[in-house]
Image (cartoon, grey):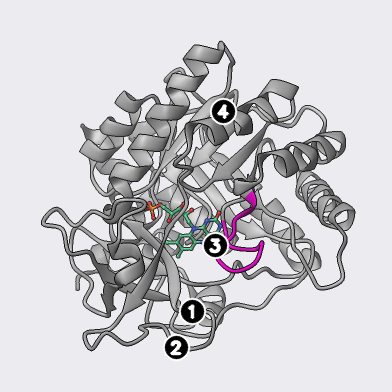
Amino acid sequence: MNQQSEPFYDVNRTYEDNYEQGPFGAFAAALDAPEQAADADSRGASGETFMGVPVNLAFGIPAGPLLNSRFTTAAFRMGFDLATYKTVRSRAWGCNPFPNVLAVHPKSADGSLTPGSAELDEGVLADTNYERPISISNSFGVPSQDPDLWQPDMFRAIEAAGPGQLLVPGFQGSRVAGMSEEDYIADHATTARLVKETGAKVMVMNTSCPNEGHNRLLCHDPLLIGRITEAVKREIGDTPLMVKLAYIPDDAALELMVRSTVGRGTVQGFSTINTISARLVDAHGAQALPGKGRERSGVCGHAIRGAGLDMVARLAALRERLGLDFAINGVGGVTTPEDYAAYKRAGADSVMSATGAMWDAELARRIKAE
Ligand SMILES: Cc1cc2nc3c(=O)[nH]c(=O)nc-3n(C[C@H](O)[C@H](O)[C@H](O)COP(=O)(O)O)c2cc1C
């Protein structure tokens, strides 16, 4: 592999090694020689915004592969004008065992996975053969440093944004044994306050990882999200808040989500989608990721492009029909400039790529070049 295609997050190393030693490939080079990497041609006003903040191009990397300020700073230097700091918590939280990433190979000719299809339960082949267009599964368990460590690092990350660039912090609540629902709501508000203390201009609250028990996501409970975002809003005041959603198949549930958040003035945008859960099997049909509770894992990259576009188009239609004003950040399977354009056509105000950017450090520059 040449340097440009070597992923900046090295899937052959542990999360801890990536955190300590990363980023790799072209991102590492951008940190070593900032003057060469400086994205001079993207500077200047373009009229684009992210949650009201002016940016060069409203394109970047969502919560996930940018583990700390070294990763986010490298992303800025490679021309990604939106860099999301991987989801943080109110307390230190361990990572799932290695491996955390596998390549995924859906059966369909175009490599896509359809929400609700039988293949997701019957098993999707997962191995270490990374091919293009790239689809992977990620299984981290949303690890976090202690706030005493991530707060000063997030501050550094915010400071490193160039002109027309924006550091987007990601956070989520943590459910621990013995917590009441009120405690769980309060944990979200506490974490949002800790994020705000770093000087964050905007923030994204993740409700789309399986922290509500096996295969259950917080974003399947719009009324609880309504209560959580009210508590968060009391802490962060006018700082714009975006909610990260998984794929929601039901239109009525999606409408209830919008009404109980945007409709009550607590939320200014949605980022969607997160991964799509699938049973992962090896070539012999056995469980692909080792360990209990890892029969299923979230798929991202090219395979989920259609599902992401569908969610964005349905949210845009709802926005129109309800006459509400909120931002839509389109995520899922963006690996080419054409994918970026497709999300914009579907109604996204901004677009982000996690898997595509991991395997193509030049993606932002290629989009800007078109
Ligand atoms: C390595 C990796 C780690 C991720 N970790 C998080 C996370 O901590 N919080 C979150 O909200 N989403 C996380 N995601 C999901 C992405 O933000 C994104 O929603 C998903 O990968 C779909 O986009 P993609 O197809 O461009 O990868 C992660 C994705 C990847 C690839």
Q: Judge left or right: residue 218 versus residue 296.
A: right
Q: Are marks 1 and 3 in contact (CB under 8 Å)?
A: no
Q: Is mark 3 within 8 Å of ligand 1?
A: no
Q: Nearer the viewer, mark 4 or mark 3?
A: 4
Nearest the viewer among 251 and 141 is 251
Question: Which amino acid, by three-letter code, is at mark 4?
Answer: Glu
Q: Position of residue 331 (x, y in %)?
A: 41, 43
Nearest the viewer among 163 and 17 is 17
Q: Nearer the viewer, mark 1 or mark 3?
A: 1
Calculate the distance from the C-alpha at mark 4 to the C-alpha at mark 3: 38 Å
Q: Is residue 200 above or below residue 274?
A: above
Q: Judge left or right: residue 216 versus residue 333.
A: right
Q: Earlier in the sequence, mark 4 or mark 3?
A: 3
State the residue at coordinates (76%, 58%): 151
Q: Is residue 82 above or below residue 325?
A: below
* SS for callout 1: loop
* Residue 45, visible in the rendered structure: no
Q: Earlier in the sequence, mark 1 or mark 4?
A: 4
Q: Is residue 342 above or below residue 27?
A: above
Quadrant housing the N terminus: bottom left
The residue labelled by disc 3 is 70
Is disc 2 surrounded by few (<14), some (14 to 19) or many (20+) residues within 10 Å?
A: few
The disc placed on residue 112 is none
The disc placed on residue 290 is 2
Calculate the distance from the C-alpha at mark 1 to the C-alpha at mark 3: 30 Å
Q: Judge left or right: residue 191 versus residue 217.
A: right
Q: Are marks 1 and 2 in contact (CB under 8 Å)?
A: yes
Question: Which amino acid, by three-letter code, is at mark 2?
Answer: Pro
Q: Position of residue 324 (x, y in %)?
A: 59, 15
The residue labelled by disc 1 is 294
The residue labelled by disc 4 is 255
Q: Residue 297: say if magenta.
A: no
